[in-house]
Image: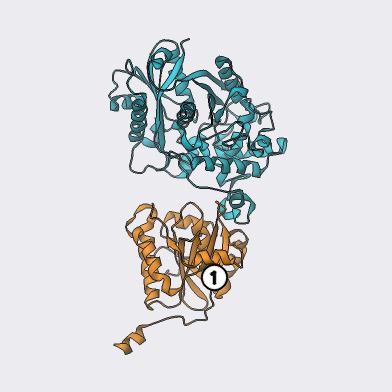
């Protein structure tokens, strides 16, 4: 069994570099700290996502159920090359995003879950994970799909993505679109923000985030 | 003319009501207002329902008749009043006239709208049908685009800045945090919506120079008041709030036909009539609710209603005069910007808020010693405006 387990376990098999945290100003003036989630934090993230799995409103159920599975797969070493970023505001978990490196050049955008709504947390986190894939991990292209009209408007239209009708996204949805390096740097001035380094005080707040009160 | 008092008021929370129909909302607020009256002599003799889009969005025409039946108020008279976003103000004016003339002793005015179940594009288009059909609408004009052009002209004529408009939003969001009925309960700051680089995402341009936080949300909700003659009101135990003055005025349908498009003549005219009837001046007012569907409108209306010199409303705002605790708090409810704007309900909800203020029931957002209040309900793009002056005893 141990031999089989060691065979089944996967991790990063492309060059990996940790994401440098940044702080973003939200509409309220509060700071959103975006940092990479540690694998051992996944149980907390799963606990935060779980209540949304049965909420049909705004496609929460689909996004929550799938992201839950993706993070669990990563935690249990069954999904290779996955990373998750979290956003924390005033010590509370505000959002979770995740991507996966298919190989060194092609990344797959997985999900964006905003737990704190109405503050553009999702938009900033989505931008951060693409920043991580392109600028930090060196991807040439990221495939993106959308499961909801909200997602389609926010990502495909607002980021001016290119359709890839000859490809299938691993989530199995509609025609995927691509963020290319060129396109990323073209939209970066209006989409990707944040200040680095993050102050010690803010990092301390972001170190052990609490789960936000479940409200939809 | 007889004196007219408000003896009951109530409203639903404004926001998104997926599980309720428009009728549910109208009934809820009506019953709250009726309950608020306590017991009084007489029956409700007439029902006025203000709703701009009940037929188009909710497939319910003759909605006043339907509400009267639902509330068990048959055989009361019933009318639906439609004056675009000023439907509420017009309905209150109509109810006021009915009581003041002696035709009825007790009337119910309820305004409501359910709009969140359709796309923003469809709402924007339907609301745009208020504009001039051949001079504006067919050229793609929408209310946000009219407001944007108005804002740009105001900025170049009077020196109003984007920061001034953002200040209106910050102030009204802050007030709404203290209003349990408000649609939006989120704090915003100038840093987050304008001064930081992140404002590009946090507060994107919608119709330059107007950004997301310069526009009110689309809301579901309803608000109601019960009015009666003053003699009946005197017998009740609640503090009396009178409608001391009422005015209405129109202006050209097409904004570009106005001699000076920055001058809201209908606001001026309606306000003047309301103050004249009340025997008061703008200087007598302790608290006001203005129609800030777009933040620039709060600034402009505060001038044309007579509270500040033309072109100086933004200076008063910068100096904190219109904040809670300032010389003339404006939009203590959160305004359309944050309390929300279910179109037909708005004018009535302004009066609900002011009634609470004048009774001393506005809790954390109470203006100290508020005795005189003013509200302005802005129809079309300022082409049909109602104004009311309220007086507390």
Q: Is residue B142 visible?
A: no
Identify the residue position indicated by label 1 in the image.
Answer: A132
x, y percentage for residue A137? 54, 75
- Mark 1 crowdedness (10 Å alpha carbons): few <14, some 14-19, many ≥20: many
A115 displayed left or right of A35:
left
A27 shown above or below B241: below
Picture quarter containing residue A8?
bottom left
The orange-tinted chain is A
- Position of residue A63 relative to residue A6, above or below, is above
Coloration mode: by chain
Location of residue B91 in the rendering, given as x and y in whole percent from the top left corner: 44, 23
Residue at position x 49%, y 35% in the image: B127
Work out whether residue B196 can be spotted. Answer: yes
Q: Colour of chain B?
A: cyan
**Residue at the image point whose x is 61% and y is 48% from the top:** B190
Q: Position of residue A69 (x, y in %)?
A: 36, 69
Q: Secondary structure at mark 1?
A: helix
User: Which of the two residues, B55 or B102, is positioned nearer the viewer here?
Assistant: B102
Locate the N terminus of chain A and report the quarter of the image it occupies: bottom left
| Chain letter behind tag 1 | A
Along the viewing direction, whichever of A54 and A146 lies nearer the viewer: A54
Is residue A62 depicted above or below B86 in this figure? below
Where is residue A44 shown, x and y percent of the image? Answer: 39, 67
């Amino acid at each position: 069994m141990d031999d089989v387990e060691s065979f089944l376990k996967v991790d990063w098999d492309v060059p990996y570099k940790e994401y440098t945290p940044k702080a973003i100003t939200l509409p309220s003036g509060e700071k959103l700290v975006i940092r990479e989630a540690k694998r051992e934090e996944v149980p907390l993230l799963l606990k935060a996502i779980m209540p949304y799995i049965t909420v049909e409103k705004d496609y929460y159920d689909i996004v929550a159920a799938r992201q839950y599975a993706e993070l669990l797969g990563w935690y249990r070493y069954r999904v290779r090359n996955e990373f998750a970023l979290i956003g924390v505001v005033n010590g509370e978990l505000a959002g979770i995003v995740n991507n996966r490196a298919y190989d060194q050049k092609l990344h797959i955008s997985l999900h964006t879950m905003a737990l704190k709504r109405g503050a553009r947390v999702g938009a900033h986190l989505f931008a951060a994970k693409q920043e991580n894939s392109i600028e930090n991990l060196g991807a040439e292209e990221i495939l993106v799909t959308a499961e909801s009209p909200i997602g389609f408007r926010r990502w495909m239209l607002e980021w001016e993505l290119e359709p890839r009708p000859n490809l299938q996204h691993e989530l199995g949805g509609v025609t995927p679109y691509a963020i290319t390096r060129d396109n990323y740097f073209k939209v970066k001035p209006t989409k990707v923000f944040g200040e680095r380094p993050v102050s010690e005080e803010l990092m301390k707040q972001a170190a052990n985030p609490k789960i936000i009160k479940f409200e939809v | 003319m007889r004196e007219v008092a408000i003896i009951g008021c109530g409203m639903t929370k404004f926001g998104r009501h997926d599980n309720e129909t428009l009728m549910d909302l109208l009934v809820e607020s009506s019953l709250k207002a009726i309950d608020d009256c306590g017991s009084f002599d007489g029956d409700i003799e007439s029902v006025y329902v203000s709703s701009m889009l009940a037929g188009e969005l909710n497939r319910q025409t003759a909605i006043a008749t339907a509400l009267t039946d639902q509330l068990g108020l048959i055989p009361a008279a019933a009318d639906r009043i439609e004056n675009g976003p000023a439907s509420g103000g017009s309905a209150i004016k109509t109810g006021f006239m009915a009581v003041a003339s002696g035709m009825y002793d007790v009337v119910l005015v309820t305004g409501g709208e359910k709009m969140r179940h359709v796309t923003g594009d469809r709402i924007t288009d339907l609301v745009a049908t208020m504009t001039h059909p051949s001079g504006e609408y067919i050229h793609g004009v929408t209310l946000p685009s009219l407001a944007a052009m108005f804002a740009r002209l105001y900025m170049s004529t009077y020196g109003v800045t984007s920061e001034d408009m953002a200040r209106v939003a910050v102030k009204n969001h802050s007030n709404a945090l203290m209003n349990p009925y408000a649609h939006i309960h989120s704090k915003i700051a100038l840093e987050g919506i304008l001064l930081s680089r992140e404002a590009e995402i946090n507060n994107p341009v919608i119709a330059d120079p107007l950004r997301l936080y310069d526009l009110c949300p689309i809301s579901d909700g309803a608000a109601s008041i019960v009015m009666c003659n003053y003699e009946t009101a005197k017998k009740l135990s609640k503090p009396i709030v009178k409608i001391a003055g009422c005015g209405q005025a129109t202006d050209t349908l097409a904004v570009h036909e106005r001699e000076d498009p920055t001058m809201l003549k209908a606001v001026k005219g309606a306000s003047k009539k309301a103050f004249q009837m009340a025997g008061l001046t703008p200087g007598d007012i302790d608290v006001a609710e203005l129609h800030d569907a777009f933040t620039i409108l709060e600034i402009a209306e505060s001038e044309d209603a007579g509270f500040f010199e033309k072109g100086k409303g933004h200076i008063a705002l910068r100096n904190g005069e219109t904040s809670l605790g300032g010389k003339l708090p404006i939009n203590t409810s959160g305004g359309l910007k944050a309390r929300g704007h279910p179109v037909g309900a708005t004018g009535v909800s302004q009066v609900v808020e002011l009634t609470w203020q004048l009774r001393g029931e506005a809790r954390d957002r109470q203006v100290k010693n508020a005795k005189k209040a003013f509200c302005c309900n802005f129809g079309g793009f300022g082409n049909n405006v109602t104004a009311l002056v309220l007086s507390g005893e």
